Image (spheres, rainbow, N blue to C red):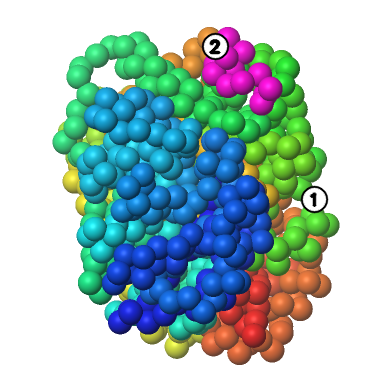
Amino acid sequence: MCGILGLWQGQGKSIDLASVQRATGRLRHRGPDDEGYLLVATGTGEARSLAGADTMPELDLPAINSSLGKTGDLAFGFRRLAILDLSAAGHQPMSSADGRCWIIFNGEIYNYVELRHQLESYGHRFHTATDTEVILAAYQQWGHDCLAHFIGMWAFALWDRGRRELFCARDRFGIKPFYYFWEGQNFAFASEIKALLELPGVPRRPNEAIIYDYLYEGALDHTDETFFGGLAQLRPAHYLLLHEQRLQIRRYWDLDSSAQAEPATDAQYAEKFYALFEEAVRLHLRSDVPIGTCLSGGLDSSAIVCVANKLLFGERAASPQLIGRQQKTFSAYFEDERLDERKYIELVLAATGAEANYTFPGSAAWPEALPRLLWHQEEPFGSTSIYAQWAVMEKAAERGVKVLLDGQGADELLAGYPGYFSSYWASLMQQSRWAELHREISAYRRVHGVSLTRMALRLARFYAPPRLSAFIDRSRHEKALGLNRDFLRQYHGRRHASSRQYDRDPFHNHLYDWLARDNLPQLLRYEDRNAMAFSIEARVPFLDHRLVEYVFSLPANQKINAGLTKAVFRRALRHVIPEPIRRRRDKIGFVTPEKIWLQEAQDWRRELLASPSFRARGYFDVPQILAALQPQHTGQHHLKANVWRWLNLELWFRKMIDRP
């Protein structure tokens, strides 16, 4: 896991190396172990590798400060978090053996061992034990199609001197970030936006359309736009080519909506699911540094901890020196029993003998932590639950863990959220499967105790005309609460179509949208930034694309069945995790008592919302906001979410936009 940065000046203009060094320095938290630079004159192909203050001394490279007068129109900057091959051989930017290609790479290719053997059979020779060198060889063997061979997470930029082409790519689900700036002449990219803002010509201005999406809909990371005007992100499963001042973006992978698993019994589906899941966890345990796991007490994290324990101590999937006598787990807890999952966490600990590491994200600390948290997140986020995850990463860093496995992606993959039930029922209706629909609705009412009226309203949203949907959506006026009318009129009706097109039943379309656009991208951004703030590599085994493809090919009743989510997963986990967790119906996760926290921070909250800067933004109806915060109004359904967005946006402006 690392930080990457690059700048290609148009029309052969020479690079300002001082700005490249300053921008790369903004990424130090992503890679404190090593530093490296490359300066290329693309016209002649001459490339010069340079050192920074943190470059490993045994490399004996010329210092970047001594090369400030050198000419070149393409520059790379790199910060390394050493995870595989901790020696100086893993230094980046890294060149191919023939010097034709140079790469900077952030992420992990988990199947690099198998790919290395395959490439050696084609005649490639390797000089390091890194996955970075495997990417270079794979590119030389297969060109842009090398991406199809990778299992993992990645964001990289590869300069091909022979083609005079820059090839940049992001992994299938966007686990690793890639931001860029392009105005037709100059191209810049980086792992984080804060680094781009240090480069000459890159603007620091708000994107008001995205701000509207956030304030009105709560939408985040749903397009290639960012909260910063002029700065974009390369979408998941896409690569970018820059050649002769022409930029092209292409998709290289997508889920196949026509793929159907071979008919099988429930037990056979579960058996194959478990085999794929176990293999994914096994690959994600490859590391040369200490490993730990997140443990919330839910199905997803409990499954990872239990399967990892089997692999670590039964099969020696990682070196004992990196694990110790116990697997290290990291959890957040709260005194509020409605949010506290320690009773489930302790079941997993008892079953595995794993070590518990608890953190207590209290209400007193979070306002003080917010400026630093916002600086690392760079863009506004959805709730204070991100602070709970931040506290877990901080605890892991204190224990010396460098790699942390987490259950992100399982809910989007296996229909883990309550909202999926409605789209599942809609699919059964669409297919005229009335007997099955009746069984599912009856089971849902029995398991969750929901009235028929409420269920009918949820189902009606899928078939109601737009005007009736608006009438049913009683929260519409609450979404607009506190927003300036001119601002609302300017952007109302703005809609973003998904960059991916999936044509199946309502249920699988719902799964696809949340995986591709509406939910998972923001969760992956939170996790990447929180983990990297503490120089930790977060890994997400559920997003092994082979597992994702298999689950999407399964019948819908393997995801939802008898009023419960994650059906095939629950069957696969029989005798793997403690039975009370396998049968859990509720879902909590790393949440916080946000409503209580916001009430306790009334003075701080009022200072922000009544401040001159907040009033001057032009987005808010401040008198309406202050009135809504009076005690008699605090029961409004969406008020908590609205208050957080108001506060979060103001803090973001102060930290990321207003600063000189």
> What quarter of the picture does the C terminus occupy?
bottom right
The answer to which quarter of the image holds residue 572 is top left
Q: Judge whether 124 appears above or below 140 on screen.
A: above
Of residue 233 and residue 591, the one placed in the foreground of this image is 233
Q: Is residue 620 left or right of residue 559?
A: right
Mark 2 Cα shell of 10 Å, populated few (<14), some (14-19), many (≥20): few
Residue 365 percent across, percent down from the top left: 81, 57
Please, what is the three-letter code of the amino acid marked with disc 2?
Glu
The answer to whether residue 464 is seen in the rendering is: no
The residue that disc 2 covers is 315
Q: Earlier in the sequence, mark 1 or mark 2?
A: 2
Region rendered in magenta: 310-323
Of residue 63 and residue 54, the one placed in the foreground of this image is 63
Q: What residue do we see at 51% from left, 67% from top?
A: 193
* Label annotation for residue 362: 1
Q: Nearer the viewer, mark 1 or mark 2?
A: 2
Q: Judge whether 136 appears above or below 66 on screen.
A: above
